[in-house]
């Protein structure tokens, strides 16, 4: 296909990549006014078996709603061509691995890789082709898994061809017997390459190339974690990515503490953490889950949540959110998360940003309802500033765990025993 060629409402701009079965193009959606990625199978690949795989990919992906799995925007036949449209990312993980990355970035990406697979396994889906090329990076190091074309449903035993990618495929998958443990093996290969800088190869005998670098940089338990994921015997690996995810979440604090300790030693500062760090740790234990504190301030490294408009530790404005989100979409203005059925951003008044969806999505984070009687009784999540359904400003003065402390400027709940600033309006606590 040529540049500026039209496919219905899409105008081709650039060839992004080409495989044995399909090509991927960057295209401009002339109706929605956005750029997308178009996957267009080759004409010679349009066999009945291939079309069955494509339909399988579309149907499996449509069933999944997770921030680290890339949804299909549309799938249709345009002028005898099968065209699948996706949101356009910045690059693949394979592209990103050609450049150096910080340990914190690598840990964040590893967590997203495992989270995406854990969700697919929870839905009883085996991906069968886990590799860096099938992870797309979006702004803020947001990683999303793609290409469920050769995925299989797990019942009891899955019999399949040895489909996959050489170098990342588990031995039993190459013999036509993929399982959840096969995806665990492939994810282990991806993680080992990302953290060691080396791609492990058959016969996967330890110590693998790059193991010395891992021993010097990371906690010993992390090396055990990778060894278990890469064990040649499926029975000795993690049962599935859900079990792998649980193990990684327990291991993650140890990895981060070890990295901080090594960085202090390398920089000649081996002293104990000061009282501010202890205060932040106590805050996370007490309020981390309630406030969904999953991020850190880029200015002071203090723990913050996605909904905070200012850092409560240093007061720096957080007008835009430059990290991952637990929602499937990002607001184009403030980069905070949005659900697929929202018409407006509830954090920054932006919108309309996505078309109205006929399907509505439930969420355990909804706690109250919009005060607008014409809003069809839509629900709100804590600390929303605007209703995502009708765009009306939320009048409710949000509290924190029914606490009495509140900001004198915005009347929203605050924690002066921990915070130096109001995270909602930025006012210093010394002038509350």
Image (tube, rainbow, N blue to C red):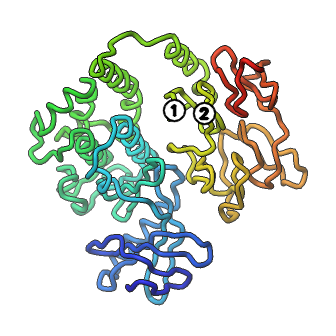
The one of 185 and 142 positioned closer to us in this rendering: 142
Res 299 label:
1
Cα distance between the residues tagged 2 and 1: 7 Å
Q: Which residue is mark 2?
A: 316
Instruction: Please state if 250 lies on the left or on the right of 416 as rendered.
Output: left
| Rendering coords of residue 64 (x, y %) | 51, 55
Q: Quadrant of the N terminus?
A: bottom left
Mark 2 packing: few (<14 Cα in 10 Å), some, or many (20+)? some
Instruction: Please state if 388 lies on the left or on the right of 106 as rendered.
Output: right
The one of 409 and 23 positioned closer to us in this rendering: 409
| Rendering coords of residue 432 (x, y %) | 77, 20
Of the two numbered discs 2 and 1 on the same chain, state the one appearing first in sequence.
1
Q: Quadrant of residue 133?
A: bottom left
- Name the residue: 43% across, 72% down: 26
Answer above or below: position of 359 versus 403. Answer: below
| Rendering coords of residue 149 (x, y %) | 37, 65
Residue 265 visible from this viewpoint: yes
Residue 158 visible from this viewpoint: no
- Name the residue: 70% across, 48% down: 348
| Rendering coords of residue 106 (x, y %) | 34, 40
């Amino acid at each position: 296909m040529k540049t500026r060629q039209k496919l219905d409402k899409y105008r081709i701009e650039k060839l992004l990549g080409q495989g044995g079965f399909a090509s991927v193009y960057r295209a401009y959606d002339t109706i929605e006014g956005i750029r997308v990625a178009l996957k267009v199978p080759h004409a010679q690949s349009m066999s009945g078996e291939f079309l069955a795989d494509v339909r399988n990919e579309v149907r499996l992906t449509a069933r999944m709603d997770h921030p680290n799995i890339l949804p299909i925007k549309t799938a249709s036949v345009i002028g005898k061509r099968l065209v699948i449209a996706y949101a356009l990312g910045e690059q693949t993980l394979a592209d990103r691995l050609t450049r150096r990355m910080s340990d914190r970035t690598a840990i964040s990406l590893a967590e997203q890789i495992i989270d995406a697979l854990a969700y697919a396994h929870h839905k009883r889906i085996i991906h069968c082709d886990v590799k860096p090329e099938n992870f797309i990076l979006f702004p803020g190091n947001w990683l999303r898994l793609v290409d469920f074309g050769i995925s299989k449903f797990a019942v009891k035993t899955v019999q399949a061809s040895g489909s996959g990618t050489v170098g990342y495929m588990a031995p039993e998958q190459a013999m036509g017997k993929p399982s959840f443990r096969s995806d665990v093996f492939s994810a282990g290969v991806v993680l080992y390459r990302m953290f060691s800088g080396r791609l492990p190869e058959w016969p996967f005998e330890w110590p693998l190339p790059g193991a010395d670098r891992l021993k010097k940089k990371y906690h010993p338990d992390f090396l055990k974690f990778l060894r278990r994921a890469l064990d040649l015997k499926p029975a000795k690996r993690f049962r599935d990515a859900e079990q792998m995810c649980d193990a990684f979440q327990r291991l993650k604090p140890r990895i981060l503490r070890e990295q901080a300790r090594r960085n202090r030693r390398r920089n000649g500062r081996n002293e104990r953490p000061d009282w501010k760090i202890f205060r932040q740790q106590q805050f996370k234990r007490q309020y981390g889950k309630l406030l969904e504190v999953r991020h850190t301030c880029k200015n002071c490294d203090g723990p913050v949540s996605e909904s905070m408009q200012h850092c409560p530790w240093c007061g720096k404005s957080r007008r835009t959110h430059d990290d991952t989100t637990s929602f499937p979409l990002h607001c184009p203005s403030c980069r905070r998360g949005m659900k697929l059925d929202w018409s407006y951003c509830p954090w920054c008044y932006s919108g309309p940003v996505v078309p109205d969806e006929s399907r509505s999505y439930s969420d355990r984070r909804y706690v109250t309802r919009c005060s607008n009687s014409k809003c069809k009784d839509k629900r709100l999540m804590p600390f929303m500033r605007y209703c995502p359904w009708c765009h009306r400003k939320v009048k409710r003065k949000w509290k924190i765990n029914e606490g009495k402390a509140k900001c004198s400027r915005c009347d929203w709940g605050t924690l002066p025993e921990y915070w130096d600033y109001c995270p909602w309006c930025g006012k210093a606590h010394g002038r509350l």
